[in-house]
Amino acid sequence: MSVSKVDFSNFINYRQLIIDLTTDLKKLKEFCNLLKLHSNNDLIDEVLKRIANDSFDIAIVGEFKRGKSTLINALLGKDVLPTDILPCSATLNRITYNITPMVKIDYKDGRVEEIEVDALPDYVTKLTEESEKISETIKEATVYYPINFCRNNVDIIDTPGLNDDKSMTEVTLSVLPQVDAAILVIMAQAPFSEFERDFLENKLLTNDLGRVMFVVTGIDRCEDDEVERVLKSISTRIEQYVIKKAEKTFGKDSDEFAVYRRKIGKPKVFGISAKQALKAKLTGNNDLLEKSCFNAFEKELERFLTEDRGAVFLQVPINRILSTSAEILKSIDLQENALSMKKEEFEGKYQVAVDEMSALRTRKKEELSKINNAAKTTFKNIQPLLSRFWIDLENETSILIEQADITINDLDKDNIETTQQKLIDQVTEKLKICSQNFTEKIQVEIAKELDAEVLRLQDFESDVALTMSKVHNMFTPLGQSTDLVKEGLVATASSFLISGFSGVVSGYRVAGAKGALVGGLSGFGSAFGGAMILSLIGIPLIWPAVLALGVVSFFTGNWVTKKVFAKDSIEKFKTGLKDSVLSGLSEMKSSDNFASKVREQIDSAFNALKSKVEVETDTIINDTQYTLDNLKRSIDKDLVMTEQEKIILSEVSSNVKKFIKTSYEINNQLVALLEK
């Protein structure tokens, strides 16, 4: 593979690049087998597995009757999903590519059933009493269909209407942290509803906001001079809600908020007519498709996924190619030069090399211990936040109840239970919002500490690079080693080309160029740098949302059961209800150790970093040790390299140098994208 400039702003080019990188990695795997670099081989397998599982998930969200199904059908270019029907139940409908159309129903009890596509409405809608009962038992329906849009590992997820009922809303919110992009559908004729405002300001996690695109559909029903005004108004309101959300998370005067505001930019708002687009695609009417403004939206959606998200994902295989290639070249150097040494000279240098690598292993253990200490320090630094958690919840609850607008009529015997339940629902919603904002602040602190620890590891990375270069140079006559810089293969002597320390420190310094607080989570501009590290070291995308969603779940259901009947006084009613609610909070505090959940989050992140550091360090040391041990056995037997072996190694070296040059050119382009 050779490149001048890579354009992967669409699915086809992106997939071709993935295929090319996979081919290079598999070829490197052959070379590693030839040279018996088994540890590097294992890491290539890990990356290949990650590539094989790579896909784009797009969730379509919005209120009922906003045109979600029509938008999905317009993307697909076919009438796959039923439109203009009653709300779907609390299920997710996934559309994915398959030559043969069919639907797979996954039930909540583990059963799986295959049905015809035409039968889908009988399972996932509320069209009939029977279909509604069936839908309540379904976890997810997967629609397989031969559609070009989904051919490139793209899945579209149709979510339940956000405001149809609470269970449906919870299903939609639960899937958002796991997708690559979310499209919020808004009607041009009815912007901007209170529920849509609340969804942006209170329901979404802050680090999800950069992955949301906003589609204003129905512009064909607006006058031409109204469209621009409507879109501008919606864009302004979205920006206000997003910024307000970020202020709650970071603090208005914080450095984090300043960076976030700069990076988040303008909301991605598109005015379209999904109805016109679908009709145009079905009839091949290009003029109508142009009028629908759908092409611009589709093009940006592809670019959004393949460039913004893809630039981070591609760092992993690129770093693996660069570091493994460097190890192969060093192994070839060792073999070509060491076998020409006298036995006594080799053995002397061999022992020095073994001692150097042994010292490096000892240093590695020390660094792993420091990572453990960093995790402990992170938890300690978060203690002030934790100590405020329940206090803040109690204060917010008390204020809400005290300021509640209640009349004496509301306390009538026929109304009091309804009044109490209504107020409890408000308290529950308030607690969910407060706890989500609180846990997002904790995530920011964890991300900052994780980022600081990764950057601290630069010294260890440099030592690994220097030590392994020293070992390499011991067996290489002056002026005869493979010099990647002199070869013109790289512009700088980056340590990940010397040490093989891929995807931990140097990988993060490249891919995380956006900074410590934004640009991380799958590359979208609103995420944290700590999440960038998590992506590079293999923690799933969902991790940053786990803590917040877990705390929110505390406040679901009827968790306050004590009934308050104080007919004679509004104040007595409020006092009684407040005591009941605070008692419920106290029970939650005592029955669930929130601090331990935070500690689990911290440990999972730092343990993943520790594991990555250990594996990468052991890989380069073990493979070098194995090469030297093999050479020692060969020299002890007075073996020399045959001409055929020299030819093979020369061909390997030539191919590997091409891989390095190509990957480094791609890497530079990825960095440029990430630094935008």
Image: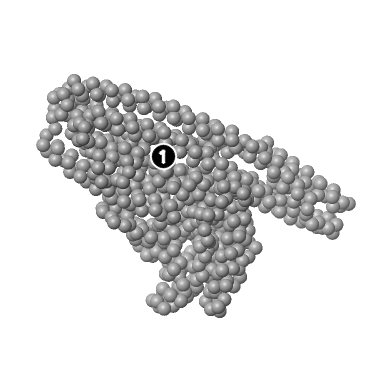
Residue that appears at 57% across and 47% down: 255
Q: Is residue 208 above or below residue 275?
A: above
Q: Residue at x 39, y 43 (%)?
A: 507
Q: Is any part of residue 134 visible from this angle?
A: no
Task: Name the one closer to the observer, 541 or 348.
Answer: 348
Farthest left residue? 643
With 402 as the anchor, is 512 left or right in this view?
left
Side (left or right) of 404 relative to 557 = right
Residue 581 in picture, x, y percent from top left: 74, 45
Q: Amino acid at mark 1?
A: Val
Q: Quadrant of the C terminus?
A: bottom left
In front of the other: 135 or 184: 184
Left or right, 164 with reference to 627: right
Residue at horizontal 49%, vertical 54%? 525
Dividing the picture into quadrants, the one containing residue 165 is: bottom right
**Above or below, 5 relative to 363:** below
Expressed as whole percent of the image width and height from the top left, the position of residue 45 reads 33, 42
What colouring does the structure picture have?
A: one colour
Q: Dot 1 lies on which element?
A: loop
Q: Nearer the viewer, residue 62 or 211?
A: 211
Residue 181 screen position, x and y as percent: 48, 57
Image height check: is 180 above or below 473?
Answer: below
Q: How many discs appear? A: 1
Task: Find disc 1 in the rendering and name its residue.
Answer: 505
Residue most extreme to the right? 568
Q: Residues within 10 Å of mark 1 (few under 14, many from 20)?
A: many
Q: Residue 450's spot in the image, x, y percent? A: 50, 39
Residue 388 in view in this figure: yes
